[in-house]
């Protein structure tokens, strides 16, 4: 049976195998970073499109607020669940891309 090299382990999505406590630490760290990053993006997108319907009085401010809060919460939960699946390195890379997209105006 072949043992995997470090490079091969990194190529497997969400691969763990560094010992129980290291793996749990990486999963928790990935979950926290993924939840914060995805919640941030979800809140921005939800706030941007939450008031697209115009609202009951023609003012979409309440819709934007609801979209921002609910979009952020839903995305945070999804990010916290999905991040340990793809691993810490990929989660960190995606969060940096999201931050760069916000600063660059492309999010």
Image (cartoon, grey):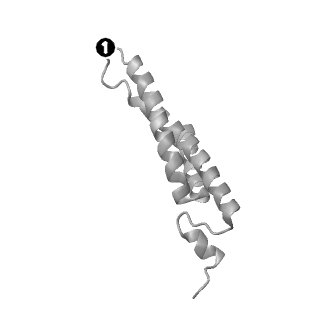
- Provide the residue designation for mark 1: 58
Tell me if residue 47 can be seen.
Answer: no
17 lies above or below 42? below
Q: State the residue in front, 81 or 46.
A: 81
Place of residue 61 in the rendered image (x, y in percent of width and height, measured from the top left): 41, 18
Q: State the residue in front, 66 or 24.
A: 24
Place of residue 71 in the rendered image (x, y in percent of width and height, measured from the top left): 44, 34
Residue lying farthest to the top in this orientation: 57
Place of residue 26 in the rendered image (x, y in percent of width and height, measured from the top left): 65, 57
| Mark 1 neighbour density, 10 Å: few (under 14) some (14–19) many (20 or more) | few
Say left or right for 91 vs 75. Answer: right
Say left or right for 52 vs 104. Answer: left
3 lies above or below 33? below
Q: How many marks?
A: 1
Q: Secondary structure at mark 1?
A: loop
Say left or right for 88 vs 76. Answer: right
Tell me if residue 8 can be seen.
Answer: yes
Q: Name the residue: 63% across, 69% down.
A: 17
Q: Name the residue: 53% across, 46% down.
A: 80
Q: Name the residue: 51% across, 46% down.
A: 79
60 lies above or below 43? above
69 lies above or below 59? below
Task: Assign the N terminus to one quadrant of the image.
Answer: bottom right
Q: Name the residue: 61% across, 55% down.
A: 27
């Amino acid at each position: 049976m072949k043992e995997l090299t470090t490079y091969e382990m990194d190529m497997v999505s969400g691969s763990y195998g560094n010992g129980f406590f290291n793996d749990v630490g990486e999963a928790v760290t990935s979950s926290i970073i993924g939840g914060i990053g995805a919640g941030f993006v979800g809140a921005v997108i939800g706030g941007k499109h939450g008031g697209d319907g115009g609202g009951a009085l023609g003012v979409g401010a309440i819709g934007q607020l609801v979209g921002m809060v609910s979009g952020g919460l839903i995305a945070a939960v999804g990010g916290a669940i999905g991040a340990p699946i793809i691993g810490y390195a990929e989660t960190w890379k995606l969060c940096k891309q999201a931050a760069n997209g916000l600063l660059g105006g492309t999010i």
